[in-house]
Structure formats: structure tokens, C-alpha cells
Amino acid sequence: MNYHVEYKDQNWIAANIEAASPAEAAQLYLRRDSEMKWQDYGEVVVFWGLFGKQSECFLIQEFLPLTPEPPEKVILGPLTQLKHRLFDGNVPEIPGQPPKVIGWFRIYTGFLCLLYLGTAAYSLYFFLADPADTEMSATAARRTGVFLLVSGLGLFGACLLPLVLRPRPWLWTYSLVLICLGMTSACILPASIPLLKWWSKPETKKYFGKA
């Protein structure tokens, strides 16, 4: 039977495992990857049945000692692999005190989030206003509103990511693109130039685990 197993307090570290019983699935899950640092967690939970409604919890201590070899029966789906590559793998050793540029970057991206959210809100004007007030046809006003809404929400989500994700090597490059994006605006250019300078410093790259 195929089981879905995960740490009880970290449900985004999960795997689908083919095993004969829930207990065997839990044991195979704990053996599969030493990078998961199973020592930090107390229980694993095993789901099975229709839509995973049935479950059973196992204490990690029940399976000690664990062998380091990962089993061949572990099946990681493409979405789980992508999550591990983007969010679980290559975790940098974050220093106790982050570089000061991180705080300024958060202010910068927070400002961009408000700016693009305001753009999305402004799009409502083209949906609700009289076409005569916009000095364009109803179709053109609607198209303008759709463009502002989609671009505003899309850029808002793009700028929000660095504020909610933990440091990763790829996130340093992603944030660099956002800094360069601000250089296309004359209003934001004065803030983007010093940010770009400090963002390229070795201590900032080290904070993100980027060699």
C-alpha cells in the first residue's frame, strides 16, 4: 500500500512510501534521508485510505537505532522534489546578526508591495467609472483595468516572496532581480543603486548561503 508520511510538526517535509504497514512506512521514511535531521522531531504521522483521512502517529524513539541507508521503496513525487530543491535543500548557516542591508531590502520590497498593491486597487477605477470620465471607450477602459489589476497583483506577489521565504542561494539572485527592477523607475532609482552595491557584498551572499 502507498502511504503518505510526514513529520508531525513539519508537514512540508513529506514523502509517499510504498510499504506493507504504517509502521514500516514510518521506519522507511525516517531512514530515507539524513538531511531531514529527524533527531529534531518527536513524532511522524502516517496517512492512508481515501484522501488520507485515516492516520497513525509513531514516536521516532520506537525505531532507534536507525540505519543511514535510504530505502529503495521511497517514492518522491515531482512536486515534493521541487519543494525540497527550493525550500529544504542547500540550507545556509545563517549568522546570528544578518547584514544591515537585509533590513533596508525588506523596507524596499515592502514599499514595492504597497506600490503594486495600490496599482491593483487603482484598476478598479477603470471598471467602475463612467467611460466618459476616463476619456476612452468602455472596451479600452476595461482592458486598461485588467492590465493594471493583473500586473499589479503579479508584481505584488513577486515582491512579497523575499519577505516570507527563508534565505536560500537562489533567493539572493531573485532579490537581485527585484533591485534591478526598481532601477527602471526614476523615483526608486536612488534607493536601488546603494542597495545593489551592498547586495553584492560577500557577507550578503554568505547570509544566503551563496558561495
Image: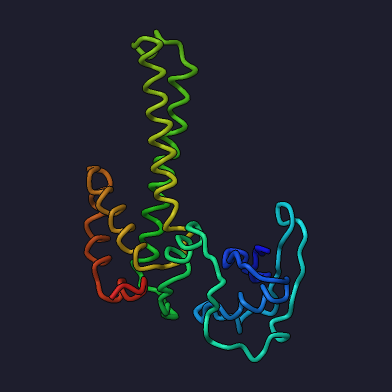
Is 107 located above or below residue 116 in the figure? below
Q: Nearer the viewer, residue 199 or 67?
A: 67
Say left or right for 156 vs 183.
right
Q: Nearer the viewer, residue 84 or 63?
A: 63
Q: Nearer the viewer, residue 84 or 131?
A: 84
Q: Quadrant of the N terminus?
A: bottom right
Q: What percent of the width, then of the height, locates residue 114?
A: 44, 44
Is 83 located above or below residue 61 in the figure? above
**Which residue lies at the image location 34% right of the left edge and 11% below the top edge?**
135
**Which residue lies at the image location 36% right of the left edge and 60% below the top edge?**
105
Say left or right for 197 vs 103.
left
Q: How many marks?
A: 0
Q: Nearer the viewer, residue 146 or 36?
A: 36
Is 210 located above or below residue 62 in the figure? above
In the figure, residue 107 lies in which quadrant? bottom left
Q: What percent of the width, then of the height, locates residue 38?
A: 59, 80
Q: What percent of the width, then of the height, locates residue 41?
A: 64, 79
**Which residue lies at the image location 74% right of the left edge and 76% below the top edge?**
58
In the figure, residue 94 lies in which quadrant? bottom left
In the figure, residue 195 lies in which quadrant? bottom left
**Which residue lies at the image location 22% right of the left edge and 64% below the top edge?**
197
Q: What percent of the width, then of the height, locates residue 14?
A: 59, 66
